[in-house]
Image (spheres, helix red, strand yellow):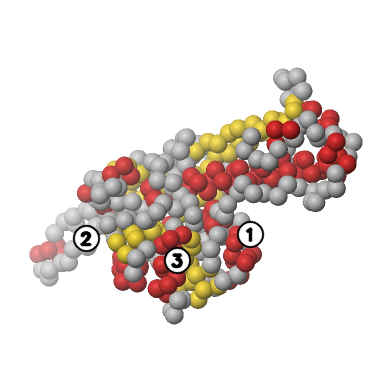
Amino acid sequence: MPLWDGSTLNTTALSTMFNLMYARKAIDIASSATPLLNLITGKSVKTQKFFKDRPAFQRVTNIGGNRIEVRLMGRLTPIPTLMDGLQELALTDLQWQNDTFGSAQFDLTHYNTVFGVPSSEFARIKGNEAKTISFAGEKYNEIDASINDTLATALASQDVGATRTVMGNWQQAVSDGTTAGEAPFAVYGTINRADADNARYRGTVLGSAGPISLTRISRGRAAVRQNNGQVNLILAAVDVDEALKQLLETRATVFNSAEWGTYGAEALQYSGMAIVADQRQATGVVGMLDTDSFVFYNNNLDGIFQSRVMEEDNARRAARIIPIDMWTQLICTKPNSNYKLTGVTAS
């Protein structure tokens, strides 16, 4: 067993009814902070008051079907000029390009599991109201924390996702698919970004970036602006985040508060950009994101952290179950409004 004397917990449940309880639920020592997930889901956090303009992700909960289609305009038509005289009398040339409009399609990722609760667990404690409430509360908290951890890990991964079985992540979304190390991310939403004709669907990537610097941050921000984007969130692993703090200590607003523990680091804001440390982020990778270009789909956004349905399973001898069924996806509708640095070092 991974914890304490958990191996004897079940057999001593009856005797522990007479122990003095410190609290009505178990203290969570397994979870870690989920900063990116909190921002994406809009989960209430005490520290949101610190940000003048808190980064926000679009969220959609009314989902029909099991795929998402994003309509795209990928080409513009030059408007010609006209000379006086004969050109004015000529027949009109009609403008039409077959490849002006297109679409990217994404599968929704399907999460599903069933938590089982043996009836014997209730039998041992049902005589004590406080412990019954405690047990139910602990189980629900475990489920909530497990969903949190699963989604937070997926959102920060470097997997090729946005499929039925793999959640999408920001690193794949804002890739260009061509820089060294980015080839696995070439295809995104059924569009092959390695094809030069699809260059507008690429994020901008600076590979082998080296030591983090204000110059690199400024260049990334400028590249995004050229594509009508606005960086409002910088994501970094903890080591790079600390280096950024040292660079910006005389220029940025740093909120050092115990409440910031919800995110796992100090709240740092510089030139309209929130800089967030997330221990799940890959080492050496920094994301400069325009959160307006992302959409988080979830068919049960209000309930995924509040799973409170426990029912008897008549197919089993003596069990209650808590079913979890969730269709979700994180997609980026405009990758070129984002910038990614790889091979970043703290110094």
The one nearer the camera, 161 or 83, is 161
The one nearer the camera, 100 or 210, is 210
Residue 106 in the image, given as x and y percentages of width and height: 42, 41
Q: Residue at x 67, y 49 (%)?
A: 28
**Real-space CA distance between mark 2 and mark 3, rounded to the nearest whole angstrom:** 47 Å
Label 2 or label 3, whichever lies nearer to me, is 3
- In what element is the residue under mark 3? helix
**Real-space CA distance between mark 1 and mark 3, rounded to the nearest whole angstrom:** 25 Å
As drawn, the label of residue 44 is 1
Query: Is any part of residue 202 visible from this angle?
Result: yes
Q: Amino acid at mark 1?
A: Ser
Q: Amino acid at mark 2?
A: Pro
**In the orientation shown, which residue stands out farthest toward the bottom?**
250
From the viewer's perspective, tell me whether residue 317 is left or right of residue 157. right
Residue 222 in the image, given as x and y percentages of width and height: 32, 69
| Circle 2 residue | 78
Q: Amino acid at mark 3?
A: Glu
